[in-house]
Amino acid sequence: MIYEIKLSGAKEDDGKIELHRLAHLAQSITDIASGALRIRLTGISFASGRRNERISNAIKIHLADLRTGSTVLQLECETFKDTLSGQQGDVFNPGILEVLPDQTPMTLVMESFRQAIDYKEGINYLDKGLLKKLKSFEKIFLEEDESVTISNQGSIQELKLKRSDIKKIQKLEESIPEPQEIIINGIVDELKYSKSRISIATADGSVNGILSDMLEPQEISKYWGKNLTISGKAHYQPNGDLSFIYIEKIFEPSEADKYFSRTSKKETVEQQILRQQRQLKNSNHLNEIVGQWPGEEDIDEILKALD
């Protein structure tokens, strides 16, 4: 599919583009597309671990042309139906992937910007890592009134970005606490759909967890229904609530682990006040730590099913 990125409003936007700026634009688009796809498949946009070659190949975007009329870059990329499915044309797994086959890396980029600019609590595919990549797009702008327009020859609604939009994304990103080290002790619930996602029943309620790429599913499967201590990084929502834990290590539980185990929140004073107001309206403490869960399919299982 063909997309156009139009740079207009700056003196340099005259059918040319400086190589350093082009490189940053290319890197930003690629990073956003990669994070947007990974968050749909795994629940987290960027994480250390093994690189997935199929995802890397699926987000390839090619510069096909550079035209005048401001500066217009013509890009080409394939749908995920063509890049993630096998040569036999297998259909995607239902659920969160029912709309993904007809999407492309560029549509995910556009969707990520729209969700961040017009942010609403609830189901969305954003986290702090992806918001940081969206925020870095500000380096593309040379002047305050310059705009960047992304379109698909009229087949989808165009996206027009200005520096003020990136400022809104920056405020949203800054409202999310940084991931922090955390220790949790609880009972591992049995999984129904995935080998890399777990649910842990703690004294404060159920907590969502994602296994690091460095952990094999069988390392935790023997603990299903039993007590377990995990450590990793807690990831948060903009309101300060815990979204999920990216699990890096697992241990046999001990008294020390139980003492240090916590589902703490790193909140601003304003966020604490808002949380207390919500508690008065709803005494269900489980709502304070359960975040939106993008989906339940394990990425390796999904990709294997598409072959």
Image (tube, rainbow, N blue to C red):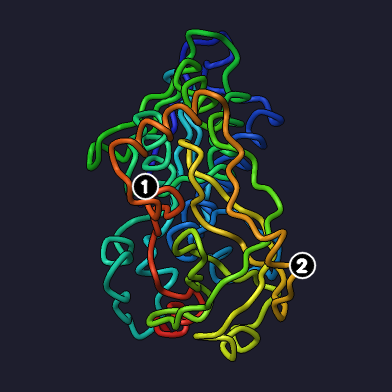
Q: In this view, does 147 lie to the left or right of 178?
A: left
For this rendering, which residue is in front, 290 or 107?
A: 290
Q: Mark 1 points at which residue?
A: 124
Determine the residue positioned at 48% across, 44% down.
241
Amino acid at dot 2:
Ala
Lower position in the chain sequence, tag 2 or tag 1: 1
Determine the residue positioned at 28% across, 37% down.
281
Q: Is mark 2 on a helix, strand or loop?
A: helix
Residue 99 lies in quadrant: bottom left
**Residue 256 image label:** 2
Q: What element carries label 1?
A: loop
Asked if residue 64 shows in the view, the reply is no
Residue 79 lies in quadrant: bottom left
For this rendering, which residue is in front, 291 or 281?
A: 281
Total marks placed = 2
For this rendering, which residue is in front, 67 or 17?
A: 17
**Residue 295 image label:** none
In the displayed orientation, state which residue is furthest to the right: 256
Residue 129 lies in quadrant: top right
Of badges 2 and 1, nearer the viewer stands 2
Asked if residue 39 shows in the view, the reply is yes
Determine the residue positioned at 50% across, 72% down.
197
Q: Position of residue 98 (x, y in %)?
A: 26, 66
Q: In this view, does 101 lie to the left or right of 276?
A: left
